[in-house]
Image: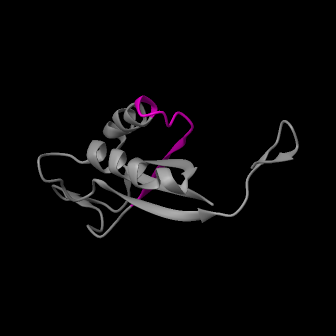
């Protein structure tokens, strides 16, 4: 079975994360810009409270055996500062039951 790794990271870290994944041989990923908030409930800048913060979402699908390596790469490259900061992101892991290639109309092995 395969795993879908869904990571939400700071926009300034997304290139570093995707480059590190590609360097390790994980070239296939999907990314898009998202907005939301985590436990920090937004950010206060002066008198203005931003309830949603821009992030990037990355989706990588890998074999079960590669899951931990991909998570480690994301965790090591997405962190900010020496010990991390609130809002650095989150990684989710989901099972992938099946996948299909549209161009060949075939089920992937």
Q: Is residue 94 left or right of residue 74?
A: right
Say which of 48 and 37 sits in front.
37
Which residue, as the protein is rendered here, is positioned at the far front? 65
Say which of 28 and 48 sits in front.
28
Q: In this view, does 21 lie to the left or right of 86?
A: right
Colour scheme in use: one colour
* Residue 85 placement (x, y as % from top left): 18, 55
* Residue extent of the magenta highlight: 22-36
32 within the magenta span? yes
Say which of 1 and 20 sits in front.
1
Q: From this viewpoint, is residue 55 visible?
A: no
31 within the magenta span? yes
Which residue, as the protein is rendered here, is positioned at the far right? 105
Q: In this view, does 8 lie above or below 102?
A: below
- Residue at 82%, 42% (x, y): give it: 102
Q: In this view, does 84 lie to the left or right of 66?
A: left
- Residue at 69%, 63% (x, y): give it: 97
């Amino acid at each position: 079975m395969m795993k879908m790794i869904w990571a939400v990271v700071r926009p300034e870290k997304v290139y570093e994360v995707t480059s590190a994944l590609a360097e390790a041989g994980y070239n296939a990923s999907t990314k898009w810009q998202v907005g939301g908030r985590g436990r920090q409930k937004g950010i206060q800048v002066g008198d203005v409270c931003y309830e949603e913060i821009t992030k990037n979402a990355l989706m990588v699908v890998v074999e079960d055996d590669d899951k931990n390596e991909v998570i480690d790469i994301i965790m090591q490259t997405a962190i900010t500062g020496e010990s991390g900061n609130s809002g650095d992101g989150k990684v989710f892991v989901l099972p992938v039951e099946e996948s299909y290639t549209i161009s060949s109309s075939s089920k992937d092995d």
